[in-house]
Image: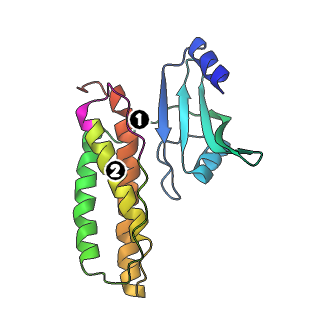
């Protein structure tokens, strides 16, 4: 894959775009259907923006032998980069609004809580991104951990419905914030 990435630079690679789709929300995807389906199954993809057309890279587990565990990427044709992706400011506002709504929804939900799962460190943005992008990315990573914990509660049907709606909205806001944070370096007024 490293050789292929190097050849993409020679071919005029101008940027990578993150896609974090979920059922009903094709965040960052713009076709064709084969790429969208693979990315949706994986829950993530990267679009390499090239002058002659874009390529979609979809990660999948690469398990060779008994001790090797890695990731390989399947390459697909990809459509044009979507212009309707959230800006960093929009993502930050949506996160704040959804956090308030989710907090209110979870206030009235009682139920058994299992042991706290170990929190995995989220990958950080590289240096050079605006401070706001780092802040939004860190908040989205923390909220992703909340989503994981919230899915482990035993609830009544009514509580489950309220929690499910709040979690779907929170999941969408988290994915949008992560995409916006990763794309912030491409925003014209970042800094």
Is 100 placed above or below 30 here? below
Q: Nearer the viewer, mark 2 or mark 1?
A: 2
Residue 143 x/y as whole percent:
34, 57
Is 75 magenta? The answer is no
Is 164 placed above or below 108 here? above
**Mark-to-mark CA distance, 2 and 1:** 22 Å
Image-based side of 113 in relation to 102, left or right = right
Q: Quadrant of the C terminus?
A: top left
At a point 31% along the width and 38% down the height, the residue shown is 87
Q: Which residues are magenta?
A: 122-132
Residue 151 x/y as whole percent:
44, 71
Image-based side of 76 in relation to 157, left or right = right
Residue 181 x/y as whole percent:
34, 38
Our reading of the magenta stretch's main secondary structure is loop
Is 125 magenta? The answer is yes
10 Å crowding of disc 2: few (<14), some (14-19), many (20+): many
Res 72 → quadrant: top right
Is 127 placed above or below 118 here? above
Residue 182 x/y as whole percent:
39, 36
Q: Quadrant of the N terminus?
A: top right
The one nearer the camera, 119 or 99, is: 119
Question: Which residue is under mark 1?
Answer: 83
Of pointers 2 and 1, the one earlier in the residue sequence: 1
Question: Which residue is under mark 2?
Answer: 140
Which residue is the extreme one toward the front? 67
């Amino acid at each position: 894959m490293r050789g292929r990435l190097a050849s993409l630079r020679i071919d005029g690679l101008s940027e990578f775009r993150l896609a974090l789709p979920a059922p009903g929300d094709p965040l960052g995807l713009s076709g064709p259907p084969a790429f969208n389906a693979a990315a949706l199954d994986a829950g993530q993809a990267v679009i390499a923006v090239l002058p002659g057309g874009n390529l979609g890279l979809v990660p999948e587990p690469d398990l060779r032998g008994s001790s090797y565990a890695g990731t390989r990427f399947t390459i697909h044709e990809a459509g044009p980069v979507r212009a309707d992706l959230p800006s960093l400011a929009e993502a930050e506002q949506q996160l704040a609004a959804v956090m308030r709504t989710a907090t209110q929804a979870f206030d009235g939900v009682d139920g058994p809580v299992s042991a706290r799962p170990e929190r995995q460190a989220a990958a950080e943005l590289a240096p050079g991104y605006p401070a706001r992008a780092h802040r939004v990315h860190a908040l989205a990573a923390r909220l992703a951990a909340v989503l994981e914990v919230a899915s482990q509660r035993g609830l009544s049907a009514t509580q489950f419905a309220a929690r499910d709606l709040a979690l779907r909205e929170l999941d969408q806001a988290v994915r949008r914030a992560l995409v916006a944070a990763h794309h912030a370096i491409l925003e014209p007024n970042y800094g």
